Image: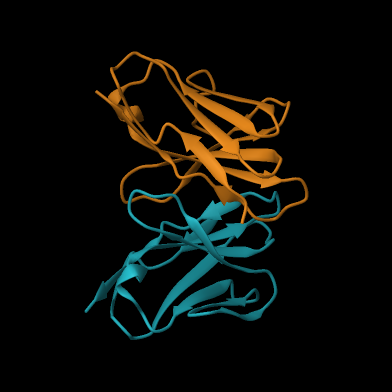
Chain colours: A orange, B cyan
Amino acid sequence: GAVVSQHPSRVICKSGTSVKIECRSLDFQATTMFWYRQFPKQSLMLMATSNEGSKATYEQGVEKDKFLINHASLTLSTLTVTSAHPEDSSFYICSARGLGGWEQFFGPGTRLTVL
Amino acid sequence: GQNIDQPTEMTATEGAIVQINCTYQTSGFNGLFWYQQHAGEAPTFLSYNVLDGLEEKGRFSSFLSRSKGYSYLLLKELQMKDSASYLCAVRDSNYQLIWGAGTKLIIKP
């Protein structure tokens, strides 16, 4: 299957700082990328969907000014958590889908801990 | 609203068979997915059903009944490494994946 990478895999930051997470599709062109958040013992929660070259579509309740998503190329999307707070500590997972594809390929996830 | 139901936790014995059920109510249906997720890791794809019936892939099989809004994942010859959470997800009319909360499967020797 297709490979999606995420960087970093783990990040610890101080409250009030911003953190950028990268998601890359390594061997295919990802026309659509999805960002999920998963709290312990809970299911995946879709935060936003982004299509290459377009603004991201955020799910209800997700602050677009806090979670900045950029999908500037067909192989890279970034999620920036601005002014992070302890309640933003979570497992962030991206997934990618190619043009006309039906399957989402998941990245390995990024564990964010905000102190 | 949209809803995916699956048991929170199941326990089974190594070498045995276990069936994990999933019922769904979504606005439209464009396929049902099963994913496996080990603790601290991202989900990995197991199966995809869009037509009624059974899809078999090695030790894992997945069944779908669209009229009943029901699916199950069948795991045979259980191994300790099968201990994980199993997520059921349905793609709705907008091609969005709606996720169940996952079933934590505990395998005992």
Looking at the image, how many numbered discs can be counted on the residues? Answer: 0
Question: Which corner quadrant holds the N terminus of chain A?
Answer: bottom right
Image coordinates of residue B14 in percent, x first then y, are: 29, 81
The answer to whether residue A14 is left or right of residue B101 is left
What residue is drawn where x is 47% and y is 54%? Answer: B43
Q: Measured along the vertical axis of the image, is residue B18 above or below residue A47?
A: below
Image quadrant containing the C terminus of chain A: top left
Q: Is residue A77 above or below residue B37?
A: above
Q: Quadrant of residue A30?
A: top right
Residue located at (29% from left, 17% from top): A15
Along the line of sight, the residue nearer the viewer: A104 or A39: A104
Q: Nearer the viewer, residue B80 or A103?
A: B80
Q: Quadrant of residue A14?
A: top left
Residue A73 visible? The answer is: yes
> Viewer-proximal residue, B55 or B52?
B55
Front residue of B99/B106: it is B106
Asked whether residue B1 appears in the rendered view, the answer is: no
When the figure is inspected, residue A80 is found, relative to residue A28, above or below; the finding is: above
**Where is B75 relative to B99, above or below?**
below
Residue B16: where, in percent of width, then height? 34, 86
The image shows residue A110 at horizontal and vertical percentages of: 41, 37
